[in-house]
Image (tube, rainbow, N blue to C red):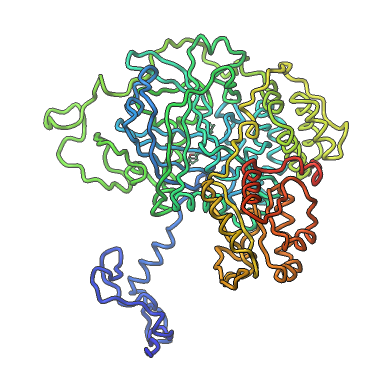
Amino acid sequence: MKKSNPKTNRPAETHQTTDSPAHTLRTNQGIPIADNQNSLKAGTRGPVLLEDFILREKITHFDHERIPERIVHARGSGAHGYFQCYESCADITKAAFLQNPKTKTEVFTRFSTVAGGAGSGDMPRDVRGFAVKFYTQEGNFDLVGNNVPVFFIQDAMKFPDLVHAVKMEADRGFPQAASAHDTFWDFISLTPESMHMVTWIMSDRTIPRSLRMMEGFGVHTFRMINAKGQSHFVKFHWRPTIGSASVIWDEAVKINGADPDFHRRDLWEAIESGNFPEWELGLQVFDQKTADNLDFDVLDPTKIIPEEIIPLRMIGKMVLNRNVDNFFAETEQVAYCPANIVPGIGFSHDPLLQGRLFSYLDTQLSRLGGPNFHQIPVNAPRCPFHNQQRDGMHQMQVPKGRANYEPNSIDPTSPRENPSFGYKPFIEEMMGEKTTLRTETFADHYSQARLFYRSLTEPEQRHLASALGFELAKVELPPIRHRMLGHLEHIDPALQQAVETALGLEGQADKIQPFIKPRTLPPSHALSLLKKAPATLKGRKLGILIADGFDATLLTALRTAAKAEKAAVAIIAPKIGGATDSTGKLTAPNLSLSGAPSIFFDAVVILTGAESVKELATQAAAVDWVRDAFGHLKVIGHTGEAQPLLDRAGLAPDEGVIALADAKSVSRFIKQAKNGRIWEREPKLRSPG
Ligand code: HDE
């Protein structure tokens, strides 16, 4: 047996050293370190000496480990991947990365929540950021979008107010990562232009099941410019190839407690297991004439263009296939900026976009500590680039030569402007008065909110009303609630009614006079996630609870069936040591029951023995597992032996509760699970509010 280590007073087995110079721990100055456990003292019980440069360096570096978090979108998860177009888009853009389907463009994508701090949970009700950096051969193009196609405000001037209102309240420092509080709804109820966005944020879109299942949007109208100098307007859309899905609110609340990293872990695990998330990039392409004929202004970021009016042209696919090597170096330090565009892409005059063009670089100067953050590997363009910008904090490059200006005659090799290849904006005539007046074409605040609400399915409408009921119940000041209820009338009187009922505040809405009377527009089915949800288990997760005496043949059949559907499987047992099947063979689970509530899974199965179920039925964790799965409208497969547990959890039989006995019943279970939740169950379990 080794002797205990005199330096640490710990068993020798816990003390790690090396004889290899290459593996020797060193300071940032390269000095080899002999003792990484103890500081230098005057005697073993004496004071620590200031001379201990190893201690000082280590602590100093640690003291500076944090950089300012993003003022919005602080919590994010990122991954590397690539983008490839399906065919040349030369008809609309000269952007080099969109010319040839053989071109694979590296990307780095970061998803985020907006309101919470970097350490907040993954599952608040919140808009998600969806930012993609394309490292093209002509420089970086950043598509810095959200998972919702509209925004709260029409002018950048209001952004600091909006963000102050939604973040923790100024005096008390709470709530963290939640819009359900007075200051948010105070601001919103005084900002009618936000009403369309309100319907989106109160919909299921803001509690996504997975980052892999979110749609993404560029929000603003952009331009594309082709080699002939012709310009089209475009709206950018990302569509996940496995379809979109959301959790329900009660699940979201519980997920935040059980696994605050739910989305981050899900993204990481999918990529690690080779199930690479994919999105198609779609464009709505239109010209000035079409824009002029629309009954809203395409420069207004609170408006969408229904796909029924301008369908998506799918131009390519993004695949995320590599996790980051280091979270801080990559996900934290990545710096997106809507002003980063390449030749062939341009801006519109959307005043919100114009404000963003200023903000991102400005914030990054302080967040990343100076003007050289473009040299950080995750931010550096992959194409060669040279210019005469010099020096500044954290300069990593060593530019050679005398000429750091242009024009110069002393270095013929120094970089010069390139009139044919260089970036040129779309040339357009500009005329107008200098004014702060907002255009009247931005004044219809309710018609598209109504369009969104009325395009949803019944369960989606129910959830929207419930979310409003929940959030407004958290508001403490009655006038804010009454004002908000007043706006709902113009979105849809039925919505107003549902929320009033949920709150028990019938007839207490303020009267609000809209500037423009809302119109009823034809519904757009593309706005509903449920209407276009594919029947699939691809990328979803099946949770199988096993207990001693379980049927191993059924487990194998379920695993095989799930694999065929490209679904992941997690085996859960009461103890991490495992459970024995009916033949006495031990199966090691992936997770133990206490750490794997059923909220983690899209569909669940309960396989128990006749004896083990008796014990399980006395355990709150097991009863909750089943009760929650039922309450969250999941498809539940179970063996006959599991019935006592189902009874204890109060399950009422319906088409989503499926008895498993043989291969045929497993197929029935899989078929039902592919359809997602059992929506018909919901009204029996929960009323809005
Ligand atoms: Fe942002 N936004 N934003 N934003 N935004 C930032 O930039 C800002 C807006 C979006 O993963 C900040 O580097 C202003 C709309 C994403 O790193 C900041 C306005 C959309 C991310 C900033 C908007 C977005 C940000 C904070 C109104 C959807 C995270 C740190 C004029 C189209 C990117 C940073 C990442 C981040 C400013 C509105 C998307 C402060 C002034 C609309 C996805 O610069």
Q: Nearer the viewer, residue 583 or 518?
A: 583
Q: Nearer the viewer, residue 262 or 541?
A: 541
Q: Is residue 276 left or right of residue 611?
A: left
Q: Residue 509, image x and y in percent?
A: 83, 30
Identify the image quadrant of the C terminus: top right
Q: Residue 38, image x and y in percent?
A: 39, 78
- Whether 642 is drawn above or below 472: the answer is below
Q: Quadrant of residue 72?
A: top right
Q: Residue at x 67, y 19 (%)?
A: 444
The reply to whether residue 285 is visible in this rendering is yes
Q: Is residue 142 left or right of residue 307?
A: left
Q: Residue at x 69, y 48 (%)?
A: 634
Q: Quadrant of residue 5?
A: bottom left
- Whether 31 is drawn above or below 495: the answer is below
- Whether 317 is drawn above or below 87: the answer is below
Identify the image quadrant of the N terminus: bottom left
Q: Residue 294, image x and y in percent?
A: 58, 13
Q: Residue at x 74, y 65 (%)?
A: 620
Q: Residue 189, image x and y in percent?
A: 72, 32
The reply to whether residue 118 is visible in this rendering is no
